[in-house]
């Protein structure tokens, strides 16, 4: 990814770019679905981080690109007939970030009473998807 990328600068994404990004998200969603059915969470996250194609995203643009990708992933998966769970959404974003060379951590938080869990993605400790708030506590980082 170069500095000219609309994701890096917040510019409008051209129609063909939107189509390509939507296809990338839907393919990653299918991969996340399959990975979670066949593997443990750490193994599924590792599968989603593997990419034969890596684009470079300058460090100064990484957080902004991550936020924008998080919004796009949430929007695209939100129109699916099945409810995309936060874990699958987080795995999809993790895959897109890995393809752009942006390091990310998948975080799972829990609330004990009544029990609930939530997953989100962070880049260097800053959330890219809606994080869990109190009384949720961080359980694991993958």
Image: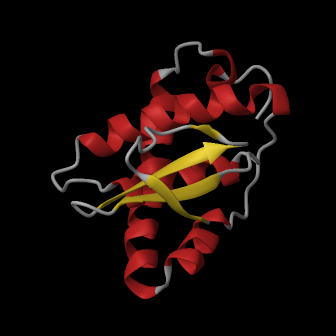
Q: Quadrant of the N terminus?
A: top right
45 to 19, vertically: above or below = below
Residue 125, x across and y down, in percent: 68, 42
Residue farthest toward the bottom in the current orientation of the protein: 38
Q: Total of numbered circles in the picture?
A: 0
**Drawn side of residue 43 relative to residue 34, left or right:** right
**Could you tell me which residue is drawn at 48 percent across and 85 percent down?**
39
24 to 50, vertically: above or below = above
Instruction: Describe the colour scheme in one phrase.
Output: secondary structure
**Drawn side of residue 61 relative to residue 84, left or right:** right
**Could you tell me which residue is drawn at 36 percent across and 53 percent down?**
86
64 to 70, vertically: above or below = above
Q: In which quarter of the image is the C terminus?
A: bottom right
Residue farthest toward the top in the current orientation of the protein: 11
Q: Which image quadrant is residue 31 in?
A: bottom left
Closer to us: 2 or 140: 140
Decide if residue 23 is in sight here. Answer: yes
Residue 74, x across and y down, in percent: 37, 39
**Could you tell me which residue is drawn at 49 percent across and 37 percent down?**
70
Closer to us: 45 or 113: 113
Residue 90, x across and y down, in percent: 47, 53
Closer to us: 127 or 7: 127
**Could you tell me which residue is drawn at 49 percent across and 83 percent down?**
40
Decide if residue 58 is in sight here. Answer: no
32 to 138, vertically: above or below = below
**Drawn side of residue 119 relative to residue 2, left or right:** left
Residue 10, x across and y down, in percent: 60, 15
């Amino acid at each position: 990814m170069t500095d000219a990328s609309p994701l890096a600068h917040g510019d409008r994404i051209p129609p063909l770019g939107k189509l390509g990004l939507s296809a990338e998200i839907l393919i990653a969603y299918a991969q996340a679905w399959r990975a979670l059915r066949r593997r443990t969470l750490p193994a599924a996250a590792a599968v989603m981080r593997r990419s034969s194609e890596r684009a470079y995203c300058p460090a100064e643009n990484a957080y902004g690109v991550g936020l924008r990708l998080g919004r796009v992933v949430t929007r695209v998966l939100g129109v699916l007939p099945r409810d995309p769970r936060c874990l699958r959404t987080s795995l999809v974003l993790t895959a897109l970030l890995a393809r752009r060379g942006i390091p990310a951590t998948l975080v799972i938080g829990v609330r004990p009473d009544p029990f609930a869990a939530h997953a989100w993605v962070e880049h260097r400790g800053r959330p890219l998807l809606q994080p869990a708030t109190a009384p949720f506590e961080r359980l694991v980082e993958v």
